[in-house]
Image (cartoon, rainbow, N blue to C red):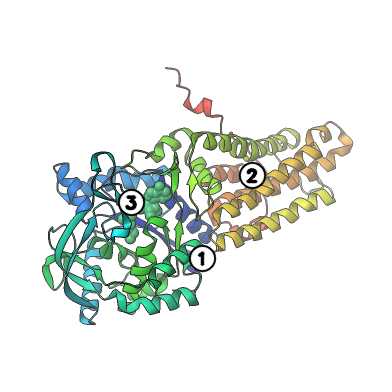
Amino acid sequence: MSAGSFYITTPIFYVNDVPHIGHAYTEVAADVLARWHRQSGDDAWLLTGTDEHGQKILRTAIANGVTPKEWADRLVETAWKPLLETVNIANDDFIRTTDERHEVNAQKFLQHLHDEGHIYTGEYEGYYCVGCEEYKQTSDLVDGTGDYAGQLVCAIHSKPVELLHEKNYFFKMSAFADRLLALYEENPNFVQPEAARNEVMSFVKRGLSDLSISRSSFDWGIKVPWDESHVVYVWFDALLNYITAAGYGQNDEEFASRWPATHIVGKDILRFHAVIWPAMLMAAGIEVPKQVFGHGWLLVGGEKMSKSKLTGIAPSQITDTFGSDAFRYYFMRAISFGQDGSFSWEDLSARYQSELANGFGNLASRVIAMVVRYCDGVVPALSAGTAGAFTAEDLAIAATERRVTDAAAAAIDKLAIHDALATVWELVDELNGYITLQEPWALAKNPESRERLGTVLHTAVRGLGTLAVLLSPVIPIATGKLWTALGGDGALVDQRVDRAWEWTGGAQVSALEPLFPRIESIVEPTDG
Ligand code: MSP
């Protein structure tokens, strides 16, 4: 890893179905963190992609009468890549596990583990959940209900598991239990948040078994290099995407400059990332990830949102009405990152109206409109003689700009995106209060308070510029429009978010359309 490198990943998503807002949530969180680091001067790199092998995809393809590759191509082009547009993700790479760069280098990794004696042949009998693509312990199973009454079902998917008996290749994962525990002890940040770390530690303390890493009863996967009658277990294959996309096996220099990564994953797949994955890397003599962060679930009606349980909501159902900025803001603000959170249309609409439209959008429109109306669009300045000396109230705003800039950066360091936003909102609220108290419209009526009017509008414009920079990783479209209207120098994405208050300010503002228009005006059908 080179100095300032920040390599961040999302899980790679199964292409058996189309995305719902749970998937988009992970994408947005990782994207906000990547944008934040990019604007903090780091060499940030955001990787996302798709997980295309395994029985689940194979069965879906067969059910749809196409080959698994045809199915994957279709879903990637019509659903998963479009998702990135829908929620405005600025990813640097998109990996598919059917990419040659992945298949070839995943095989190299496997061969290396085989050569080093970490793999052996064995037999396995156990319950397999195709939804999870995982062998289950009986403690992971529950009694089925309805159609599945009398059968054991997976606690996550509520669908029956299958009893499999196969001759497989095994990875000697049990040999790494002590090293894993030492890793969690010595580096408490490796798995976060704390509840996730505790869960992973107690899981490993109960003892680790070896891991079956191949399947031979179907052939949709990467061939095991020394035995082509087996394909690589889909999770073993998928986890490797994080290194094959970063140059492992083909570009040592690139790999050294990016790796290790910060992995953002849902808590459902924490163990794969915090136990199996570092053990695989230890076996291969590769540095473990920088961090694995397990976020919570989006709940709808109290249940984990999922397509199979018919609670799934497509991201475009929200963005078509509210826009991608509001989607991004809502999920990052309303849910503590790392904990479960309930989605409701009422909460989304209420926050859109009170926080984005009234709190932030109106503030921006009013300040700019007043600079246009009272000052012909020219931003008043002390140096031009159009603003006076700062009073305690003005200096308090400047102090808040600095304080929230630092506090937001500290929150992002802990991946507490919700805290960063709450902190920035203190500046939104304080600026609104400042305008109410200073009453620039009253100052404008009196020629004698002209200079004071200039100071107030100058202070407000500066505060808005700081907000545009601080909020740009979360609501890039609205803040981009605001930045242009404020006459900010250069591109907003090039402004340093960790020094947001330092922006130098524009000389002239230009008209600003409402950043978060009333929803009725968006959904109303247009004439003609
Ligand atoms: N393909 C594996 C991951 C392999 S990574 C090497 C997989 N894919 S998945 O399509 O099922 O996506 C899982 C991820 O989607 C979760 O870890 C989480 O990030 C996100 N979510 C899916 N449903 C979700 C919610 N209801 N709530 C929040 N996130 C959710 O597992």
Disc on the earlier residue, 2 or 1: 1
Which of label 1 and label 3 is nearer to you? Answer: 3
Residue bearing the label numbered 2: 486
Q: Helix, strand or loop at disc 1?
A: loop
Q: Is residue 46 left or right of residue 331?
A: left
Q: Is mark 1 within 8 Å of ligand 1?
A: no
Please tell me which residue lies in front, 425 or 197.
197
Chain-order first, disc 1 or disc 3:
1
- Residue type marked 1: Asp
Residue 42 tag number = 1
Q: Pinpoint residue 95: horizontal percent, then vertical percent.
A: 31, 58
Q: Nearer the viewer, mark 2 or mark 3?
A: 3
Point out which mark residue 365 bears: none
Is 521 situated above or below 505? above
Which residue occupies 55% across, 54% down? 417
Q: Secondary structure at mark 2?
A: helix
* Residue 288 x/y as whole percent: 39, 73
In the displayed structure image, the side of residue 185 where residue 132 appears, left or right = left
